[in-house]
Image (cartoon, rainbow, N blue to C red):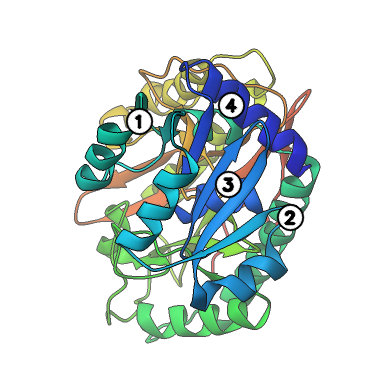
């Protein structure tokens, strides 16, 4: 599998008129080498090299796949080692660090700073990646079963997050480190659920709450992403109605999933259902996104997307309705694109009222 990845990476690198690919970002380093850590990865037609500080050399040698490992000093030392290694090459690199890029440009005939080759290669998953995503998805399903057992009136969002993360970590699933949030999960009850990216708070669940539980966790490097919305106690008729609209919307989107379909068409299928029921202005985000080594990867499933689905892409479909200061509902699954959508989550999407 690794050889196929490297072949694809070099193909996309050559399309940019470059012959050497340099990875600074840990996700891209891992994809290229099998090693996740503080290091630089260098890929060309002759092979793959990891430039690592001494504290990472041992692990790099153990965890990487068919890579040469070069020891260097940290910081400027590693850059100096890199420059000596790629002298005279046409380099494409994923870093946008100004000082690093300028140093490379000063010494090399061609430097492109872009993540394009990595994201292009990473869009379509290989069997090893799909197997890991399935394992991660099954852990999320177990966590939703735990939600049914644990959620109760008077429990705080934060308390539920503690229970869920403890369960996840015991099974090898961890927080993604997504930079735009301070919390590992989204757990939002009552009016907080009307905020798509709500932060977990000390608010206690109340009778009648709709509770959005968005689980986005990493297992063996790869991220699975799912959302379920639960009702607690006496749920209003409006909340039940909105839930069924979102469920129908997601079903419409999933039915569109297959190779060759425009991502924009999937978004439109979901948005049309919600719009016809009068809630269009409350669906305030795109329908989905790619998943893999990061929470959000290509392709984007939104109104302006130009992407077309390909077999073995890993994506989410997650329509939602958010009524300010009242409640929100979101239903999300991670899936693999095949002859039809291969949904990786088995936990029910019927409304569970606890």
Regarding mark 1 in the picture, which secondary structure is present there?
loop
Camera-near label (4 vs 3) is 3
According to the picture, the residue beneath numbered tag 2 turns out to be 65
- 171, above or below 119, in the image: below
Q: Say the numbered circle drawn on residue 108.
A: 1
According to the picture, the residue beneath numbered tag 4 turns out to be 252
According to the picture, the residue beneath numbered tag 3 turns out to be 292
Q: Pick whichever of labels 1 and 4 is earlier in the sequence.
A: 1
Q: Which quadrant is home to the C terminus?
A: bottom right
x, y (%) of residue 325?
Answer: 19, 56
Gap between marks 2 and 3, in whole Å?
Answer: 19 Å
**Left or right: residue 240 compared with residue 96:** right
Q: Residue at x 41, y 37 (%)?
A: 93
| Numbered marks: total | 4
Whether label 2 touches label 3, CB < 8 Å: no
Q: Pick whichever of labels 4 and 3 is earlier in the sequence.
A: 4
- 161, above or below 154, in the image: above
Neighbour class for label 2 at 10 Å: few (<14), some, many (≥20)? Answer: some
Gap between marks 2 and 1, in whole Å?
Answer: 28 Å
Camera-near label (2 vs 1) is 1
Image-quadrant location for residue 60: bottom right
Q: Which is nearer the eye, 203 or 351?
A: 203
């Amino acid at each position: 599998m690794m050889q196929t990845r490297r072949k694809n990476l070099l193909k996309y690198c050559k399309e940019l008129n470059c012959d050497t690919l340099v990875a600074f970002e840990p996700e891209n380093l891992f994809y290229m080498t099998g090693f996740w850590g503080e290091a630089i990865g260098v890929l060309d037609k002759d092979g793959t090299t990891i430039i690592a500080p001494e504290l990472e050399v041992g692990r790099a040698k153990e965890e990487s796949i068919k890579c040469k490992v070069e020891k260097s000093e940290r910081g400027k030392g590693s850059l100096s080692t890199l420059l000596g290694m790629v002298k005279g090459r046409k380099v494409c690199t994923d870093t946008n660090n100004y000082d690093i890029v300028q140093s490379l440009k000063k010494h090399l005939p061609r430097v492109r700073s872009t993540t394009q080759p990595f994201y292009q290669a990473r869009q379509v998953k290989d069997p090893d990646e799909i197997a890991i995503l399935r394992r991660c998805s099954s852990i999320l399903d177990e966590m939703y079963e735990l939600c049914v057992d644990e959620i109760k009136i008077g429990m705080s969002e934060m308390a539920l997050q503690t229970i869920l993360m403890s369960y996840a970590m015991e099974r090898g699933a961890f927080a993604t480190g997504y930079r735009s949030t301070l919390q590992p999960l989204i757990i939002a009850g009552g009016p907080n659920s009307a905020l798509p990216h709500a932060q977990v708070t000390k608010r206690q669940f109340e009778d009648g709450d709709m509770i959005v539980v968005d689980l986005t966790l990493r297992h063996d490097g790869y991220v699975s992403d799912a959302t379920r919305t639960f009702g607690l106690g006496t749920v209003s008729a409006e909340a039940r109605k909105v839930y069924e609209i979102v469920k129908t919307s997601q079903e419409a989107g999933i039915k569109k999933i297959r190779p060759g379909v425009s991502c924009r068409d999937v978004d439109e299928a979901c948005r049309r259902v919600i719009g016809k029921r009068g809630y269009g202005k409350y669906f305030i985000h795109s329908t989905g996104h790619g998943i893999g080594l990061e929470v959000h990867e290509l392709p984007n499933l939104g109104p302006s997307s130009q992407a077309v689905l390909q077999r073995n892409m890993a994506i989410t479909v997650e329509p939602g309705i958010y009524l300010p200061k009242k409640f929100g509902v979101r239903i999300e699954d991670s899936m693999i694109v095949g002859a039809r959508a291969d949904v990786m989550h088995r936990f029910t999407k019927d409304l569970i009222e606890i």
